[in-house]
Amino acid sequence: MSDQTSGRTGSAFTPAPGAGFIPGGVGRMQEALIGADYRRTAGMFTGLIRDGQSMPELVRHALNVAAPYLTVPSHVMVAENGEYSNVNYDHCVLGLRASRRLLPYLPSGHRQLAMAQAVWYMPQGLDVWDQLLCEFPGHYARDDKKCGLRPGGTDENGSDRFDGPAWNAPKAWFDTDHEPDRAGTSADRLRRLQERILEGDRHGAYRVSLGLRREADPVVRRQLEAQLLFCGIIDLQDTLQTRKLQNIGHKALRARAAVDLTSLIGWDHADPLYYCVVPDLACFPRLYPLFDMTTVTLTNRFKGDQWSLKARNVGHLDHVNRDRLTAAMLHGKLADVTEVITDLLADGIRVIEISDAIIAAFCRHLVDEAWSSKSFFQIGHAFDYSNVVSFWLRGYDHPHQAKAPYFQAAFINDCIQMNKFFPPDPGSPLWVGDPREHRAWADRLPLSECLVQLLAATETLDYPHAGACVESYLSRTRERTKLLRTLVLASSKMQNDPHQQRHAASMVEEWELTTAGDGARDTMLRAWVKYVAGGAKRTTDLECVRMFEASLGLKSSVIHTPVHLQADRGVMGLTLAKPVEMP
């Protein structure tokens, strides 16, 4: 990683080499993006969409200028005392990927709303390294580090300098050789890609990936995607409870974004994606304790036969074994969960059915036990990570796929145990509330009005009313698509936080594809509304959706949130109350 200073001429920023602005309105949007002027960037994106520009083309050009700034020198900053603090992972590509997945579920006029939210965020997600040093504007500098409150943090008008636009172009960017490494057979290079990533050779990993991308054989392309997903999935902390060194699944999420956005913008235009994703897979920290554990576990039980388990296992998960796995997930420790998964694999149960049952158990936990508005941060990541693992299982073949459920279960079980450290406290200001108190009110609403009130309640993070609407709706009709679409729209209105759209995309996909049955699907919907209406948000501001609707001449979807009730909250991380006394 080279810390370079991009040149500036007059009022125009110069992007990193190889990522120049193109002429016209698209170029002006690119320049606004690099200048961290997020309002102008999103407004221009929406205007270009309105004027007939292709959304995939706009995403491609946005990525082309942003990519060099989305790989940080490290995900750890070393303090003067030698200790370290975590540097966040890029969320720009994650928001774009998730928003693309939501397109079919949004109303026709609002089809690009989630994508506009992703673009609104992009200028604020650049150069995270310098944001944390209060040297570049963006939401990490503004909301997390509160740089605007420090001396010199306001401009001559008293406005927060870290709310953008930038006064300097982003400095930290990944300076590398873009010459593809094409030495050896494709099998040699796929293995070398894993080695480079595990060793932390970001330059080498990127060049090997470019060489594989140049192969015309679609089989090799699929193998490259499978290998990238594998390398992202196996890089995961063993626990969140006693570790500061963690990545909460972000490398897997970024690998998935590279795969999905490639299909959006086209294989021939996807180099910028690999530029910002592949080096990050090799970035420090690299955490492989669970990969080691699963290797030992499977080798001890299957003596080398584990490589064919996914293809060989064709049995279905019955209710007895599903209940056993659910009980281990909800009430056991990692050793208990590991034992159950290993037994199920030995009994010939399909790997994807084990995976789906793990996710269904997690949704049960969210519905029955999550009670604090600030308890959704890590568990939301665990759900999104597990969705990437299931995506890998459903769509690809890879020799290590029998290990996949262990990773999902370890992350989810760890989050469940963390939540159990904090007993429910209805008197806490973080209490999300109880939908049962408003069930009679919801039952009196016509079904169509139930969905309207659900959308309204999510704006003000009123989970008791939102949850009551969902419970009433589920009990009165077998229709689910309209409810799903309402929750997608509600999630797409959430501003300045790609987690919201990403979680919605994960929920949609798991709801569509789970093998766990209709009961599990309804539990997912209950868990989803609890996340979107109960979890603390970075902001309740709806400026982006108002801008989008005004630009396109759409009827407002904002129901009960006047401007004076909107607020930037800067909510990040996990904060709960009254921890359990630990033995």
Image (cartoon, rainbow, N blue to C red):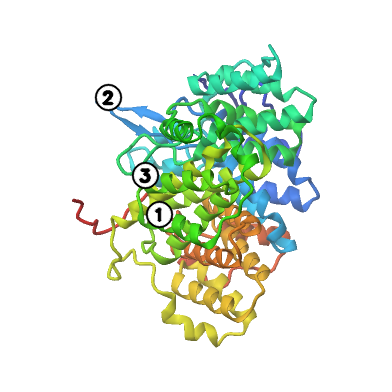
Q: What element carries label 2?
A: loop
**524 to the left or right of 54:** left
203 to 510, vertically: above or below? above
Q: Give the x, y percent position of residue 4.
A: 52, 20
Mark 1 or mark 2, earlier in chain: 2
At label 3, which amino acid type do we have? Ala
Gap in angstroms between the C-alphas marked 3 and 2: 34 Å
Q: Give the x, y percent position of residue 173.
A: 54, 25
Query: Which numbered marker is on residue 82?
Result: 2
At label 1, which amino acid type do we have? Ala
User: Answer yes or no: do the residues labelled 3 and 1 have beta carbons within 8 Å?
Assistant: no
Q: Is mark 1 on a helix, strand or loop?
A: helix
Q: Which of 474 and 149 is in front in this view?
A: 474
Query: Which numbered marker is on residue 7?
Result: none
Q: Residue at coordinates 76% horizontally, 36% vertically from top-left? A: 266
Q: Residues within 10 Å of mark 2 (few under 14, many from 20)?
A: few
Mark 3 or mark 2, earlier in chain: 2
Mark 3 or mark 1, earlier in chain: 1
Q: What element carries label 3?
A: helix
Q: How crowded is mark 3: few (under 14 residues within 10 Å), some or many (20 or more)?
A: few
Gap in angstroms between the C-alphas marked 1 and 2: 39 Å
At label 2, which amino acid type do we have? Gly
Q: Which of 108 and 468 is in front in this view?
A: 468
Location of residue 152 (image quadrant) = top left
Q: Is residue 492 visible?
A: yes
How many tags in the picture?
3
Identify the residue position indicated by label 3 in the image.
Answer: 335
**127 to the left or right of 272:** left
Q: Which of 565 and 127 is in front in this view?
A: 127
Gap in angstroms between the C-alphas marked 3 and 1: 9 Å
Query: Which numbered marker is on residue 328?
Result: 1
